[in-house]
Image (tube, rainbow, N blue to C red):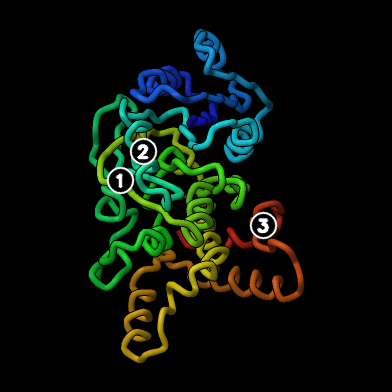
């Protein structure tokens, strides 16, 4: 069984298309857990119209997307877990094709796919083919970056090519080992992906099986400085997980190639000072015995805001 978690919040315009895309799956062994995170529009009334017994509808006070997702994951019973944002929608064969790939590749722990990017009216804007196109920023020397390789993990470290929380389906054992989403406003999906792919086998299916919706109320467009802070935080908090991949050999030629790829692959949007501050503080707090020191910046608004003030837009 696949457990699908929909974190719902004020998406009355899209929530029925989202739910219908689950009901229309060619794969039928699923449960749908909808966690409404304090919607003030008609989302809950629309969700309540559905009577399929595989659907569970839970309402809670607003606590943020990561809390809604984590509550849903805690209730899930499936062998496979996945999230579907309430403004996105599945293609009809998404679950069938992903589960089929899992079934014949026992070593794979997480699957993502290509995605169709659509606008508020469901008009197609393009197909994002993982790390091969539609990058979030200009890459001047792509042939010198991780994007010139087929390495899933290093490409994930370079940028969030899965693009959305909706674009990951993973084994229950992954969730039990890695844990749920952390308290990030914009990039909890990227952080989760890096925690997974640094220590698990991940695969991207080369076929668009998801509609990822871009519209003027996307969370990612609400506070650019905070988003840039989270990009710096993501790399600072997770880069050490990839040390063996980033430094595969001390042979001079390999070392130089690795060095060039690192220098060409990371783009901190002119906020290198913030990255180095975060990395230095996190590293030294670990040495001082502080558990999960990177989460200090997520849970203390005063500390976070004092650093965001230095972000360059």
- Tell me if mark 1 has few (under 14), some (14-19) or many (20+) residues whose alpha carbon lies within 10 angstroms of its own: some
Q: Quadrant of the C terminus?
A: bottom left
> Cα distance, mark 3 to mark 1?
32 Å
Q: Are the residues flagged by discs 2 and 1 in contact, CB closer than 8 Å? A: yes
| Circle nearer the viewer, 3 or 1 | 1
Q: Identify which residue is drawn at 52% across, 31% down.
A: 3
Say which residue label 2 marks. Answer: 98
> In the drawing, what numbered circle is on residue 295?
3
> Cα distance, mark 3 to mark 2?
32 Å
- Tell me if mark 3 has few (under 14), some (14-19) or many (20+) residues whose alpha carbon lies within 10 angstroms of its own: some
Q: Secondary structure at mark 1?
A: strand
Q: Earlier in the sequence, mark 3 or mark 2?
A: 2
Q: Earlier in the sequence, mark 3 or mark 1?
A: 1
Q: Earlier in the sequence, mark 2 or mark 1?
A: 2
For residue 195, above or below residue 162: below
The image position of residue 100, as x and y in percent, is 34, 37
> In the drawing, what numbered circle is on residue 205?
1
The one nearer the camera, 206 or 274, is 206
- Tell me if mark 2 has few (under 14), some (14-19) or many (20+) residues whose alpha carbon lies within 10 angstroms of its own: many
Q: Is residue 24 left or right of residue 224?
A: left
Q: Identify which residue is drawn at 35% across, 44% down.
A: 104
């Amino acid at each position: 069984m696949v457990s699908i978690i929909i974190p719902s919040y004020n998406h009355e315009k899209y929530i029925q298309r989202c739910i219908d895309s689950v009901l229309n799956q060619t794969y039928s062994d699923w449960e749908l857990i909808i966690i409404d995170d304090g919607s003030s529009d008609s989302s809950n009334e629309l969700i309540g119209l559905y009577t399929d017994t595989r659907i569970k509808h839970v309402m809670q006070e607003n606590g943020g997307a990561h809390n809604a997702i984590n509550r849903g994951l805690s209730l899930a019973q499936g062998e496979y877990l996945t999230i579907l944002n309430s403004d996105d929608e599945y293609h009809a064969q998404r679950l069938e094709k992903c589960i089929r790939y899992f079934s014949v590749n026992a070593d794979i722990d997480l699957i993502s796919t290509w995605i169709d990017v659509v606008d508020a009216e469901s008009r197609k804007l393009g197909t994002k083919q993982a790390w091969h196109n539609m990058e979030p920023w200009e890459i001047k020397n792509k042939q010198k970056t991780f994007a010139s390789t087929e390495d899933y993990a290093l490409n994930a470290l370079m940028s969030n090519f899965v693009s959305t929380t909706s674009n990951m389906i993973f084994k229950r054992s992954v969730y039990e080992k890695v844990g749920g989403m952390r308290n990030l406003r914009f990039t909890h999906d990227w952080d989760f992906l890096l925690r997974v792919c640094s220590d698990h086998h991940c695969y991207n299916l080369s076929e668009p099986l998801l509609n990822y919706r871009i519209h003027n109320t996307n969370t990612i467009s609400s506070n650019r400085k905070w988003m840039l802070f989270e990009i710096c935080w993501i790399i600072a908090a997770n880069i050490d997980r990839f040390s063996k991949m980033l430094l595969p050999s001390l042979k001079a030629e390999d070392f130089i190639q690795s060095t060039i790829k690192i220098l060409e692959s990371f783009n901190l949007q002119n906020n290198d000072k913030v990255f180095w501050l975060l990395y230095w503080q996190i590293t030294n707090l670990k040495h001082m015995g502080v558990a999960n020191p990177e989460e200090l910046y997520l849970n203390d608004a005063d500390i976070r805001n004092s650093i965001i003030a230095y972000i360059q837009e």
